[in-house]
Amino acid sequence: MSDLTRRDLFLLINLSHGDLWLAHVDLAGAGLAHINLERADLRKSNLSGTDLSHAVLSGAHLEEADLSHANLEYADLSAANLVHSDVRGANLRGAKLEGATTGGMEYDAATVWPNGVNPEELGAIISTAGIGTDRRP
């Protein structure tokens, strides 16, 4: 994880009044359960292995974010932009995806989806590449 601590992140959120810009940040492996990142800009951020269970990410920009092996159980991703994000091995059980933009999300056999969600109907793409493989040109 970068030098940004959970306490620093909470301070930033409280001072930002929403629309927090954290693009390209490295929060890999961070414990951020129950955090409110509504409308945050997390484009191309490294959130691999991060605990975002029960997090509020509604309206967040997660384009091309690395969410591989992240715990997004019961996270609110409604109206979030997840285009070309990497959710291989992620746990999305119980996550809210209503209104989310999901085209090109990359998943694998280990990805856990909410009940009744068909990833292909979301425009997600099954991957056979290994985690950590650079999948972008």
Image: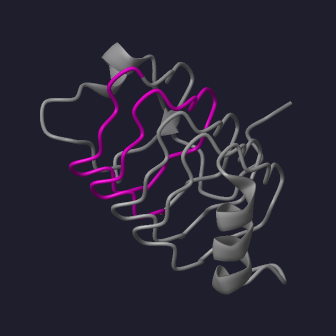
Percent position of residue 32, x then y: 51, 73
- Vertical relation: 37 (above or below) 106: below
| Left or right relative to 110: residue 132 | right
Q: Is residue 127 visible?
A: no
Which span is picked out in magenta?
A: 70-99
Percent position of residue 112, x then y: 28, 50
| Snapshot colouring | one colour
- Is residue 89 or residue 24 the one in the foreground? 24
The picture quadrant where one finds residue 73 is: bottom left
- Specify whether residue 91 is painted magenta: yes
Instruction: Name the residue: 42% across, 59% down.
Output: 55
| Left or right relative to 114: residue 41 | right
Q: Is residue 27 visible?
A: yes
Residue that sits furthest to the left in the current view: 116
| Left or right relative to 104: residue 45 | right
- Is residue 137 or residue 71 the one in the foreground? 71
- Is residue 56 or residue 68 the one in the foreground? 56
Instruction: Name the residue: 65% across, 36% down.
Output: 61
Instruction: Name the residue: 79% across, 49% down.
Output: 21
- Vertical relation: 100 (above or below) 7: above
Q: Quadrant of the C terminus?
A: top right
Percent position of residue 86, x then y: 58, 44
- Is residue 56 or residue 52 the one in the foreground? 56
Percent position of residue 84, x then y: 64, 30
Instruction: Name the residue: 72% across, 43% down.
Output: 41
| Left or right relative to 41: residue 93 | left
Q: Main secondary structure of the magenta part?
A: loop
